Amino acid sequence: MVKTLDLRRVSAANLQRKKAALRQNLPPLVGLLRASFVKQFLTCGKKNCRCRRGFKHGPFFYFVQSLGTGRVRKFLLKTPEQRKQARAGIAAHRKWQRRLAEISEINTELLRRGWAEKGRAGNL
Ligand SMILES: [Zn+2]
């Protein structure tokens, strides 16, 4: 959930400063992954396996990506390197999402006030 900032009482100059600070500290655009990292313990099909007595197999780590209504892409992350990459990419994506949401909040407030801004590259 994105936190909603109360920007209505913040001056336009401070909003611009806040935005400039956010823009300067954007995380690196490397390996972004819009997905979830899921850890699971599983039972197998063997009748007398220990997993039937509560000692489940695992943990297994999965990459899970929502593809829209009822559709997901899911696969097992087999190696420590895959898991490391998935964790980092998912964390980086979340960081970008939060940062963009904050910038959007500021832009929304500026728009609400009718504060005109010249559209130029890198202005977000
Ligand atoms: Zn088992």
Image (cartoon, helix red, strand yellow):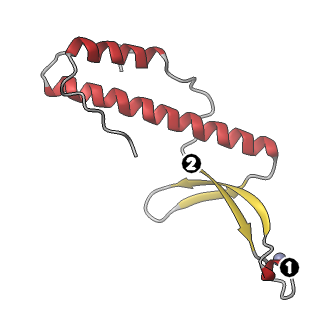
* Res 123 seen here: no
Identify residue type, mark 2.
Ala
Residue at the disc numbered 1: 50
Specify the farthest residue to the bottom: 47
In this orientation, which residue lies closer to the viewer: 14 or 81?
Answer: 14
Residue at the disc numbered 2: 35
Picture quadrant where residue 100 is located: top left
The residue lying at 73 percent from left, 40 percent from top is 84
Answer few, some or many: residues within 10 Å of disc 2's Cα (few below 14, many 20 plus, some between 14 and 19). many
Picture quadrant where residue 33 is located: top right
Q: Is mark 1 within 8 Å of ligand 1?
A: yes
The quadrant of the picture occupied by the C terminus is: top left
- Secondary element under disc 1, as helix, strand or loop, is helix
Left or right: 73 with respect to 48?
left
> Residue 87: x percent and y percent?
66, 42
Identify residue type, mark 1.
Arg
Nearest to the eye among marks 2 and 1: give it: 1
* Res 73 seen here: yes
